[in-house]
Image (cartoon, rainbow, N blue to C red):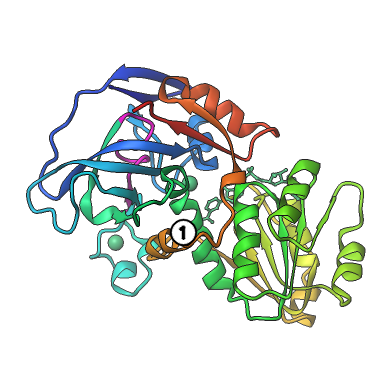
Amino acid sequence: MIGAYFLGNKTIETRPLNLPEPGEGQVLLRVCACGVCGTDVHIYEGGKGSADVTPPVILGHEFSGYVEKIGPGVEGLQVGQLVTVDPNIYCGKCRPCRQGQKQMCHHMEAVGVTMDGGFADYCLAPYAQCVAVPENTDPELAAMAEPIACCLHGIDRVGIRPGENVLVVGGGTIGQIMLQLARNAGAAKVVLSEPVEKRRQLAVALGADAAIDPINENINERLQDILGCEGADVVIECVGNPRTSAQAIDAAARCGRIMLFGVPHPEAVLQTKMHPIFQKELTIMGSFVNPDTQSRAVALIASGRLKLKPLITHRFPVSQLEEAIRMQMGPDSIKVLVVTEG
Ligand SMILES: NC(=O)c1ccc[n+]([C@@H]2O[C@H](COP(=O)([O-])OP(=O)(O)OC[C@H]3O[C@@H](n4cnc5c(N)ncnc54)[C@H](O)[C@@H]3O)[C@@H](O)[C@H]2O)c1
Ligand SMILES: [Zn+2]
Ligand SMILES: [Zn+2]
């Protein structure tokens, strides 16, 4: 039994894991698969997660596992059951928590960020964070519940109405999920902007109506040709840089809604013409993590409505987490999973 401990300063060390006994309200999970997220990459490089990180800690917040042992006071879970973990833990007592805005919690903790997570053979998790996965669901797909849950919160906020046209900017894991969710929400046309050809092709295979190369094509002209109108009703930015965010705002139709979903560098500054925001009555918004959407993500995975298998491009054992992180950073991967050998 091993765990990949993040020690800070771009260092990860595989260490033996003492099999912990689950305490009050905890379950011990035998991890199946844990996705490498952009956030793990940010943390590895010295940035912040959804909360502050204090090494040594086992990262990994996108995972599925089988319940191995149940602690006192745990209800509704059985040994052997497959679950996913909603990593974000809210205090329930602060002002935002009491106002229906738990994702703004002043005391947020997160499994795989502030406490040991899924890059290990086993993980202790609060049972209240576990969502049971229907039988016969592929555990690797179940490991994608957290990123899907984040996307659902973004989709809920931007509110796609049937018949609207949607542009997704950025075709990594998140963009490829977003375009499928937009399609499921009833979008008339879904278009992706993405520089990597393989990712454009994948998007079309997954249901996008067209894909634009933002480096060699004029995005707005192509978009107008494809949609037959001035711009997209909804634009979802899934890159997180100032240029693509400005492009997203620029590509919106009158009364358009722009979801800036990508996580920018903390110092990044957005430069955009202000007049169109006034004249086109644009709405620009953000989205933070996955409040109350993990169960819907699991239901969607189990329904088979999302094509997720093609997004998983690489698998690494726990002992090769650094290789997995490097692969996730490169252009050849979409979603890299760390998988246990059990
Ligand atoms: N808001 C949230 O709760 C939340 C949750 C999860 C992830 N995120 C963020 O969403 C973003 C996307 O996540 P991901 O895992 O797909 O990241 P990723 O890095 O795998 O994907 C980004 C994609 O953008 C593409 N890209 C680069 N330049 C571009 C350009 N000029 N125009 C269009 N596309 C361009 C890249 O080729 C890549 O395919 C990240 O910033 C991530 O941190 C946000
Ligand atoms: Zn994540
Ligand atoms: Zn709170």
Q: Is residue 67 above or below residue 165?
A: above
Residue tagged by mark 1? 149
Residue 125 visible in the shown view: yes
Q: Is residue 19 in the magenta section?
A: no
Q: Main secondary structure of the magenta part?
A: loop
Residue type, mark 1 in image:
Ala
* Spot occupied by residue 58 in the image (x, y as percentages of width and height): 35, 31
Q: Residue at left 17%, top 31%?
A: 20
Q: Residue at x 37, y 18 (%)?
A: 14
Residue sitting at x 72%, y 48%: 202
Q: Is residue 217 left or right of residue 264?
A: right
Instruction: Say left or right for 100 vs 223.
Output: left
Residue 101 spot, x, y in % from top left: 38, 69
Segment tinted magenta in the rendering = 107-121
**Relative horizontal placement of residue 243, taking residue 142 as reference (left or right):** right
10 Å crowding of disc 1: few (<14), some (14-19), many (20+) = many
Which of these two is toward me, 80 or 110?
80
Q: Nearer the viewer, residue 260 or 134?
A: 134
Say which quadrant the C terminus sits in. top left
Q: Residue at x 19, y 27 (%)?
A: 19
Question: Is 115 colored magenta in this rendering?
Answer: yes
Q: Quadrant of the N terminus?
A: top left
Furthest toward the front, the residue is 136
- Seen from the viewer's position, the closer of residues 252 and 195 is 195
Q: In the rendering, at what x and y percent does residue 135 appear?
A: 34, 53
Q: Position of residue 331 (x, y in %)?
A: 70, 34
